[in-house]
Structures are given as C-alpha cells and as structure tokens.
Image (tube, rainbow, N blue to C red):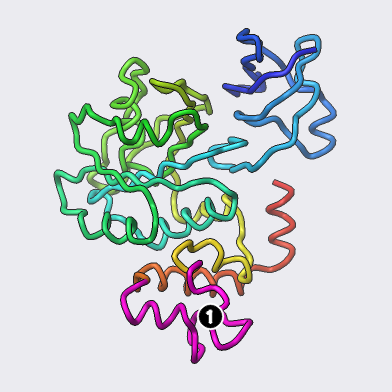
Amino acid sequence: MTQGMIHKAISGFYYVKSDDGQYLECRAKGIFRKEGRSPLVGDRVVVEDGVVADILPRRNEILRPPVANVDLAVMVVSATQPQPNLLVLDKLIAICEWKGIEPVLVFTKSDLADCSRLCALYQKAGFSVFTSVPGQRDYTALLDCMKGKLSVFIGNSGVGKSTLMNSLMPELHLATAQISDKLGRGRHTTRHVELYPLPGGGLVADTPGFSTVELDKYGYIRKEELAGCFREFAGYEGKCRFQDCSHRSEKGCAVLEAVHSGQISASRHESYCQMYEDALQVKEWERKEEKRR
C-alpha cells in the first residue's frame, strides 16, 4: 500500500506519482462507480496492488478540466481575437473564489490591442495581472506566482493557453491551434488531463477551451454566497443600512456607494448583478444534479 498524487488520467488509466518518486499505472477500484465517485488528476490517493483503492479528502475540485486540489487558476484572456468577455471572466473568477482557488489573470495578444485599462481594472480589484505577447521569453513573475502550487489554465477557445504554456515550458511542445477566421475561435487540441512540472517547482494542467454555455459545469453559486466571491466587496461588509442587502439597488448600500465613487469597478458590479439574477433562476434540483456530476 502506498500514497501519491494522480498526475495523468486517460482512457480509464490513472498515472500516480507515489510519495517515494515512483510512477504507477493503475486502474480504479470498481466501487467508486457505484458510489458515484471517480478519481481526478490532482487527487491524493492510496494505491494497493496496482489499483487506486481510496481517494483522500479533497480541498476542492473543478470539472473542466477535471482536476482536484487546485491552488491557483491562471485565467488566460485575449486582448482581441476573440474579444474579451468580462462577464464570462468575472463568472470564472467568482467560481474560483467560491472554491478557494486563487485567480491570476494573463492578457494575451497585448501587442494587437491595448489592454492597459483591463489590467488596471483587475489589479484594482485585488488580482495579480500579467500580459503576454508572441515571442516573449521572460515569465519570471508569473512562474513565481505558480511556484510550489497546483495550477490550471482556464480560458475560452483561441485565447492562446497552449501557446502560453509552450512559452513557460518550451520542452513540452504542446500542440497549438490556429484561430479560425470564419468562426472567430480556436480549435482546442488538448485531449486528456495531465499535470506538467514547472521550472522551479509546482505543477500545471492544460485545459480544453470552453464555450459560454458550458460555464454551468463549474458549479452554481447561491445568491447569498455571491458577494463573498467579489473580493473588492469585503471592505464594505456590514456597512450597509440593511443586514440582508443584496448590493443591487437598496438605499444605504455601502457597495453601491463605492461603485458610484469609483472605488469598485462598475463593470465588476454589473457582472455581480447579472450573476445574482442568474442565481435567482437556478432551481434546487439543478444544484443537486450539479453535485452528483
């Protein structure tokens, strides 16, 4: 019996790096399927007789890509081609905050469009923000953020996730896809989930691209939990006139006052309001179904 972390999952096989440095090819115990569970890349597991016999408790998990125990999410956003969708970005950031995953933003293609306003917007909100251009070689600051952590790259198709990973780790030569001018999006080429070692320490998983309609795969945040997923709201907690303030239109709302004074970004608040409305529409059976997936 030995313990380790799953580093790759493909076609029903799990590749575990044991605590003593060995790589083990395993199948999973059949009982997991009956229990509605399955091992994920990033899971700490117990291996017995070449089989994943137990999954140790997880801190968190995401389903696209299916990775557990994530420390940091690198949000890859293109400055153009495709145009950035701030509502989608804010939804992803909120979901990461909800799951206890630190969001970091990288704006790619910054040579093609000015993204300084967007960088300033998210830096003011309290996030680490980086830019990337083709041919860039110095990613020291980004790698320092990822050092010693399990990170995932998240972004919609065509934003340049695999290209960025190639720049961070040229030895991997990950496949990259060209942008389709007709469709305005890339053809994602990542075919399985695998953790790759980072220079200087840490692990990172590449992801397939996603479309907006797939965002529900990341989970549903309840309306009463949503304000806690916008970190710039924290300084105004408990300062509203009404204890049950939704921070949307109430008189005496400290968050709204901060938006009007420019302390909180109007676009971030608009995303919050849209997500609040979306949360009102989610039925309880949908939340239960999401938990079973």
Main SS, magenta residues: loop
Residue, x 74% and y 63% (percent of image)?
Answer: 285
Q: Which of 211 and 260 is in front in this view?
A: 260
* Kind of residue sitting beneath label 1: Lys
Q: In this view, does 21 lie to the left or right of 205?
A: right
Indicate the position of residue 172 as horizontal and vertical percent values. Answer: 37, 18
Q: Nearer the viewer, residue 80 or 142?
A: 142
Give, as a single range, the part of the protein colored magenta: 234-263
Q: Badge 1 is on which residue?
A: 239
Indicate the position of residue 46 as horizontal and vertical percent values. Answer: 76, 21
Q: Which of 127 and 197 is in front in this view?
A: 127
Indicate the position of residue 85 as horizontal and vertical percent values. Answer: 34, 58
Q: Quadrant of residue 126?
A: bottom left
Residue, x 70% and y 60% (percent of image)?
Answer: 287
Name the secondary structure under disc 1: loop
Residue, x 39% and y 67% (percent of image)?
Answer: 268
